[in-house]
Amino acid sequence: MWWQRHSTESGIILILFFFITWSIGIGEVPLYDWDEVNFAECSREMRVTGEYLYPQIGFLPFWEKPPLFFWIQSAFMGVFGENAWGARIPNVIITTLTLSILFLLGKTWHRAEFGVAWVFLHGISLLPSFYARSGLIDPLFNLFMLGATIAGSRGIFSPPWGLLMGVLSALATLTKGPVGVLLPALAVGSLGVIQRKGLALLKLGTIAVIPYMLIVGSWIALLYCNRAHHLISDFFAYQWRLLTTSDAGHGGPFYYHIVAVAVGMLPASIWALGATRLSFRELPPPAQAILLLSAWTLLIFSFVKTKILHYSSLSY
């Protein structure tokens, strides 16, 4: 078949197809999710006030999220307007980049046809296609953590990759908080233990922490210089509340996220069951790291008391 003979071209065409279809009509539906509305308002108020160091809601400091996503969203609003289209188009682009990474990974690990199948199934699955057309933070957050994990899995065998892991983990942290470094670190650390690369892990961590501290530390230093450092303690108090209580009534059973991923990733979750016949050790290290990343995500957020659909979206 033509698509098998020209599978790379097929992958590019498929990615462009999803980009176009996700873009159609995203400005026609008003912002409806509580988070969508608040995040868009944060970005709008950044543009109005010129205060880009931290987000605001009602022109008061908003300590629940760091500012990186709002920087990006406000930039797109400057081009496309302060409307639903401007709020949502960043995630269309971000999810398209994610599909491109999945295609390249599939092509590298197996063959281009596998990459095409991976892109297709991910793109048509329920929750990925929903998030691609939303104004939520999680697609960007997940992209940075996925990249950090892949870089870290390579860094176990070639420590200079730790620089990229540190940069991407820092960007994830500035997007949604320290979980952005915790989950990639757990996945890569687990992989290092499995691969018996203890010394390599130490080298990797030493290298990765340098760009991480420079990037995150610079933002924290600016908060202190502008007498806004109280936002840090407010942020961690909010995170503790999410961890230990069913915040805002968002409770659920322990298995909430397992069901959410299994149902929300249809039809890809059915296809993924076929992978259970493979031996974990037969997979390349980056693939092992991604599986570990998904496992840690489901495990940690199953214990978190607040159950919100977004939390396990990295598993997608």
Image (cartoon, grey):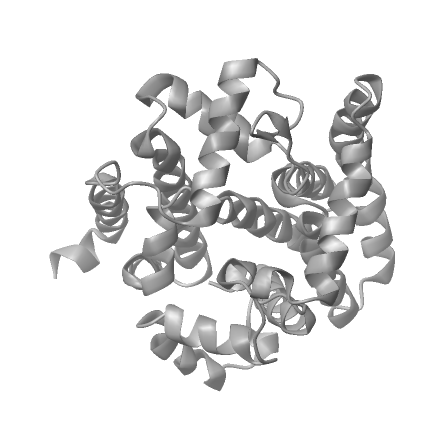
Give the number of marks: 0
Q: Position of residue 235 (x, y in %)?
A: 74, 43
Q: Residue furthest left?
A: 1
Q: Is residue 159 visible?
A: no
Above or below residue 9? Residue 190 is below
Q: Position of residue 76 (x, y in %)?
A: 40, 24
Q: Nearer the viewer, residue 127 or 2?
A: 127
Q: Nearer the viewer, residue 100 or 22?
A: 22
Residue at 63% over, 44% down: 176
Above or below residue 62? Residue 46 is above
Above or below residue 26? Residue 99 is below
User: In terms of image quadrants, where is residue 175?
Assistant: top right
Residue at 23% over, 49% down: 14
Q: Position of residue 250 (x, y in %)?
A: 56, 66
* Quadrant in which the N terminus is drawn: bottom left
Q: Residue furthest bottom?
A: 277
Residue 232 left/right relative to 59: right
Q: Is residue 289 visible?
A: yes
User: In terms of image quadrants, where is residue 285?
Assistant: bottom right
Residue at 42% over, 53% down: 102
User: In terms of image quadrants, where is residue 67?
Assistant: top right
Above or below residue 60? Residue 106 is below
Q: Position of residue 40 (x, y in %)?
A: 45, 34
